[in-house]
Image (spheres, rainbow, N blue to C red):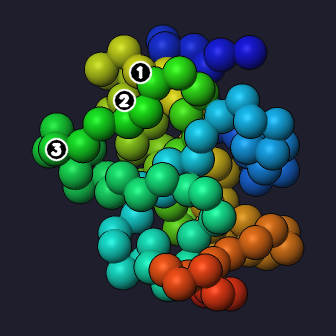
């Protein structure tokens, strides 16, 4: 089911993981480079909120967009920004902190076990 372009929604880490596992969504990490390098969800695309806000980055087409940050604040801002541009996206409640706390994989820039900073 596609997300609504009329306003951002929020989903749980568990639902985000299911959507990614099923291949129906793409995870977009909107944190800054040092945070992403320290630890991100495997397969997450790196598109910092600062680049989205400046119009210097594009998001992929074709799949539902699930946005994630450290705690959920920046991803909520990114989802609202994209909604203003007519792009449907949801953010992950609790962000990477809840992702890691839920036992889901986190890897660093080299593919080793990562940490959420």
Mark 3 and mark 2 residues within 8 Å of each other at the beta carbon: no
Marks 3/2: CA–CA distance: 13 Å
Given this view, does label 3 or label 2 mark the residue nearer the observer?
3
Residue 82: x, y in percent? Answer: 36, 29
**Secondary structure state at the residue bearing disc 1:** loop
Q: Secondary structure at mark 2?
A: helix
User: Farthest residue toward the front?
Assistant: 110
Distance (Cα) linking label 2 and label 1: 5 Å
- The residue located at (63%, 48%) in the rendering is 92
> Closer to the N terminus: mark 2 or mark 1?
2
Query: Residue 30 location in percent, x, y?
Result: 41, 56
In the displayed structure image, the side of residue 50 where residue 77 appears, left or right: right
Give me the disc on residue 117.
none
Horizontal side of 48 relative to 112 (left or right) equals: left
On the image, numbered disc 1 is attached to which residue?
Answer: 87
**Disc 1 to disc 3, C-alpha distance:** 16 Å
Residue bearing mark 3 = 56
Question: Which label is found at residue 82?
Answer: 2
Query: Is there CB contact under 8 Å for labels 2 and 1?
Result: yes
Residue occupying the point 73% across, 43% down: 20
- Residue 8 in view here: no
Q: Nearer the viewer, mark 1 or mark 3?
A: 3
């Amino acid at each position: 089911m596609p997300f609504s372009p009329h306003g951002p929604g929020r989903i749980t880490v568990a639902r985000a993981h299911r959507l990614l596992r099923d291949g129906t969504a793409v995870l977009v990490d909107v944190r800054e480079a040092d945070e992403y390098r320290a630890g991100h969800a495997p397969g997450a695309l790196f598109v910092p909120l600062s680049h989205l806000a400046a119009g210097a980055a594009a998001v992929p087409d074709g799949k539902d967009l699930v946005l994630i940050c450290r705690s959920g604040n920046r991803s909520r801002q990114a989802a609202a920004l994209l909604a203003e541009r007519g792009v449907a996206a949801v953010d992950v409640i609790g962000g990477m902190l809840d992702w890691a706390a839920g036992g889901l994989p986190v890897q660093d820039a080299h593919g080793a076990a990562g940490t959420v900073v």
